[in-house]
Amino acid sequence: FHEDVKARGVLIVVEGLDRAGKTVQCQLLLDALQQRGHQVKYIKFPDRNSLTGKIINGYLQGQAQQDDHSIHLLFSANRWEAAQRIRSDLSNGITIIVDRYSYSGAVYSAAKENPDLSLEWAWQPEVGLPRPDLLLFLSISSEETAKRGGYGEERYETDAMQSKVRHLFERLLSMNHGHDVHLIDARFPVDQVAKELLNSTLGHLSERKPLETFAKLR
Ligand code: 2DT
């Protein structure tokens, strides 16, 4: 057993409503960790450049219609396409910051209130994907995000949808996933939120537990 066996990277997911500040915060966290000498990568879901990503992009921009289940499974496939890469990067000591993941996957689909598409149904295709070590949830009300200036033009960017998403995130995060969940108040100024994200993350960087996978919802 050698001292120089490389510690694996840490899998960190950042989630939240549209306009909660996820992408800016991911970038600041990436910079802060790199400055501290960590090897870090940023990835985001949906990855609009992959094969499934192109279909997803067309759907989000309203250029194509899709059955709710079908598009849901494509979003999940978009993560499965990346799963092997995530595993190998982590085992090579690279920490990964993920901008949206399975939680967005389940709640946005369930928010459509299709009677045949429950939160439990929506979670199922995520079972077996790499489970993050830490989930950072940027917490903000849908009223607050609406105040941050108009949503974009994409599907889902409406008040009604965002408030359903918000409630479903609460439900999903109240279930035990076996990893740490940190709720971060995203109403504060950008640098204050960034500090909290960094503090939450630093506590996890020395972790060497084996990578786990998502289980069924209980
Ligand atoms: P961005 O604005 O962050 O690009 O997200 N979404 C996302 C889903 O419906 N299912 C998923 O699995 C993921 C990852 C959230 C685009 C929109 O896609 C939604 C907003």
Image (cartoon, helix red, strand yellow):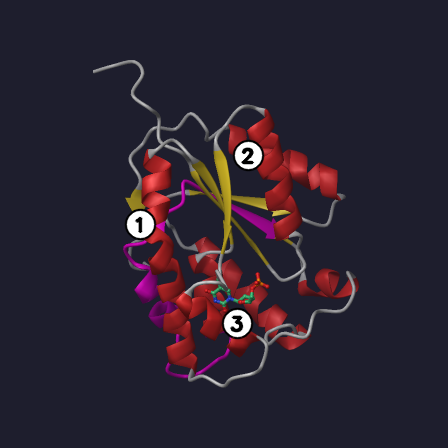
Direction from residue 71 to residue 152 in the image, left or right: right
Image location (x, y in percent) of residue 138: 61, 50
- The residue lying toward the viewer, choosing from 38 and 170, is 38
- Which amino acid type is marked by label 1? Gln
Residue designated by label 2 = 200
| Residue range (magenta) | 110-138
Amino acid on which disc 2 is placed: Ser
Which marked residue is nearer to the observer: mark 3 or mark 2?
3
**Quadrant of residue 62 within the rendered picture:** bottom right
All told, the count of numbered labels is 3
Q: Which mark is residue 84?
A: 1
Is the residue marked by circle 2 packed among few (<14), some (14-19), or many (20+) residues within 10 Å? some
Image quadrant containing the C terminus: bottom left
Mark 2: secondary structure: helix
Q: Secondary structure at mark 3?
A: helix
Q: Could you tell me residue 22's position as x and y percent?
A: 61, 51
Is residue 4 located in the magenta-colored stretch of the structure? Answer: no
Say if residue 194 shows up in the picture.
Answer: yes
Residue 174 point in image, percent of width and height: 46, 54
Marker disc for residue 141: none
| Camera-side residue of 76 and 114 | 76
Q: Which residue is mark 3?
A: 57
| Direction from residue 105 to residue 189 in the image, left or right | right
Magenta segment: does it hold 137? yes
User: In which quarter of the view is residue 91 placed?
Assistant: top left
Local packing at callout 3 (Cα closer than 10 Å; few below 14, some 14-19, many 20+) is some
